[in-house]
Amino acid sequence: MGGITTILRYQWRAYWRHFTRAGNLTAGNQGILLLLSGIILFKYFQLLGTVTADLAAGKIVLLERLLAGILLAWLFPLVSNAHLSISTGVLRHLPLSVKELFGIKALSLFIPPYVWMIVAGSLAICYPLAHAPSPLAGISAALLFIVMSWLVGLILAQLISIAFWRKLLCAAAIGLLCAGGLYVMSGKDQMGLSHFSSFLPTDLVARAAVAKQSWLAIGALSGLTVIAVCAALWSFQQSLESTTSRRSQKNLNLILFKFPGKLGGLSAKDFRYFRRLLDPYLGLLAGALCSFYLVTADNPSSDAFRVFIIIVFVPNVSVAFNCFGLDNRSGLDRYTLLPVNGKEIMLSKNSAFITIIGVQLLLMILLAGWRLGLGVAALGLVQAALLALAYMTWGNWMAVNHPFKMQFFRLSSGGSPIDALGGVVFGSLPGVVAIWLFRENKPGVVWIIISMLLLYGALYLCSVIWAGRNFERKRERIGVW
Amino acid sequence: MTEIEMHGLTKRFGDFAAVLNLHLQVPKGAIFGFLGPNGSGKSTTVKMLTGLLKPTAGEAFIAGASILSSPLEVKKKIGVLPEDLALFDSLTIWEHLSMSGPVYGLTRQETEKRGEQLLNYLDLWHSRHTYVDRASYGMKKKCSLAMALLHNPQVLFLDEPFEGIDPVSSRNIKDLLVLMAGKGITVFLTSHILEVVERLVGSFAIIVSGEIVCSQTIEETLRSGQTLEDLFFKHVGRQRVEELEWVG
């Protein structure tokens, strides 16, 4: 136990040193991040009052939604724990058992302050439950649910770090999405799937609170929690073993030569890196939703298609704005050793970004061509080009000036939310203007669009030259995470 | 003909002078050893010569190109095995070679042919599809060395090339360096293994606290009746250390 406490103490020190070494505690705008979290919590606490009244009236819908929100909130810190400086892998040489290592991993996730807010928010759900028809059962069920949410996040974070499980989870997610899509398209509850919702943990908590077979619900939740504990321990053990294997990767190298030219290899490397970040998969999901909409809607709207194009770009902010975030010091040294200048490095990063975005947009643009006409699809391409230029213009500036560390198979975190928000506004602006222009369809629209393309093209070229020069100047400082 | 020239090369980190006023010349086709204790400024010098660090003062020329005014030209002419190996996580050994070949202007076929020969030479061919972050230190080092050699550089900078390398590969690397030097390629290496350096290099310099304290040929050393080790300890010295009574 002493060993665990000591290591946690140093984890704590290493975490906070990340900010103090950056010069001050405002690094990464942590204060603003906390402020934003505070605003969300405030809104959440307001909703708790409504849930209290609902529960008294026997209504459980809002409670179930908030519980689902709590489950999602617990996934966030666990999937994006990039700031923990001492990873479990490096602790393996110490005389600690797997259970002790698991304890360190599980407890160290409570170090970042935003996790304290999630804990506070999760425990606050007990307030409305205390006013429910069966308060004791409701609170007990909620506490079990919170522990289970934490464990589910832990299991997912651990499984994502294992190649086999990553593929399996990806296949399962695609399968579920397709099945869900087909089910929704059918428009009927033919298989009676709605009955399954009564076995969901959120529903079990609600049932315990409103005294509908309370103890049965708590029993089921206890069983699920025990299973989650076992699964978390098992997945942790698996993740530890997977870090030591030296597997051969024969098939993946084929991708490299598909990028032509001198910088092809560098672009392919960045494409590989970017697709190992979880954020672009959210963009892919948005693209899939748009494709689903285009296929299933009776009269799909071209405006909705254009809005979806803007939405697809948003989850890719980390890829566009922090293109050096996945490179370590050693990799950045290689960039310096290669006979390429900063401008070429920025171009290789940008072409990898365009490829990532292209993959996300490809299907929806093809489907738009089929359902909405080739003209709409072509205008969609123009809009996407404008968005890409704007995102890369802002991103090149950000990538050199405010780089932050990202981790493979995690959601990115740690950047300044204000910079990211500014970038999303700047990046989305030409897309929004394009939608407005396409809707108005006034004479001269073509010239305005061409002017916009030229303007953003010029801005982009300036950003590449400027960022390239700055990369050469600041390279020694980039990558010192 | 001089291939590496340093004129007053200096690197300061704040008040600390890591390298101070280095003047050195290495002829074409030489194997030159750059020796010194830990923290003496060896790697900092290599970093400055290869473009990883900008000198605070002074100038250096590699194969006639200035490291300050023509850094890209220098990079095209040199091959580097850096201290931290400069490898990308999540790329395989083969992918590293495939990526760097075209950057140096090699065709895909040329890159593949040379890559295969190099990896076979370094006994790495069967492990070519291993991710470098899952490879052993020796494998990583050989990968970085293969990248340094792939484009047939005019000057080779090797920072501790034999550390962590198995004896067979180590022997192969030594033979290769002798062959390269015979063909006019200049090799600038740092190493702590003095026996290896003594047998391999033609001339050497010893750097202590950022300043060169000795620069001569091996022949001159042996003629003076000393070994490289004698000379090294003479300049570097050996601090008296307290005995660890608690050991055992």
Image (spheres, coloured by chain):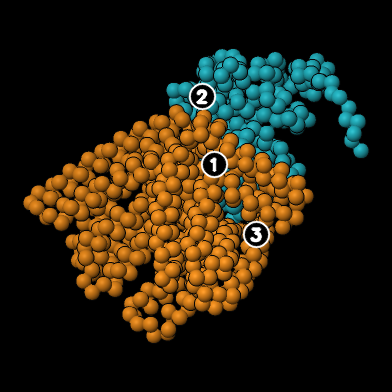
**Helix, strand or loop status at disc 2:** loop
Look at the picture and state if A291 lies above or below A197.
above
Three-letter residue code for mark 3: Phe
- The residue carrying mark 2 is B54
Tell whether B88 sits left or right of A420.
right
Q: Which mark is residue A236?
A: 3
Three-letter residue code for mark 1: Asn
**The C terminus of chain A, quarter of image:** top right
Q: Which mark is residue A328?
A: 1
Q: Which one is nearer the viewer's eye here, A169 or B28? A: A169
Which class describes the residues within 10 Å of circle 2: few (<14), some (14-19), or many (20+)? Answer: some
| Residue at figure coordinates x 57%, y 21% from the top left | B13
Tell whether B127 sits left or right of B95.
right
Q: Tell me how far mark 1 sits from mark 3, CA to CA.
A: 25 Å
Chain letter tied to orange: A
Mark 1 and mark 3 in contact? Answer it, CB < 8 Å.
no
Q: Tell me how far mark 2 sits from mark 3, CA to CA.
A: 44 Å
**Helix, strand or loop status at disc 1:** loop
Task: Report x, y in % for residue A388.
Answer: 31, 48
Asked if residue B160 can be seen in this view, the reply is yes
Q: Chain of mark 3?
A: A
Q: Which one is nearer the viewer's eye here, A422 or A329? A: A422
Q: Colour of chain B?
A: cyan
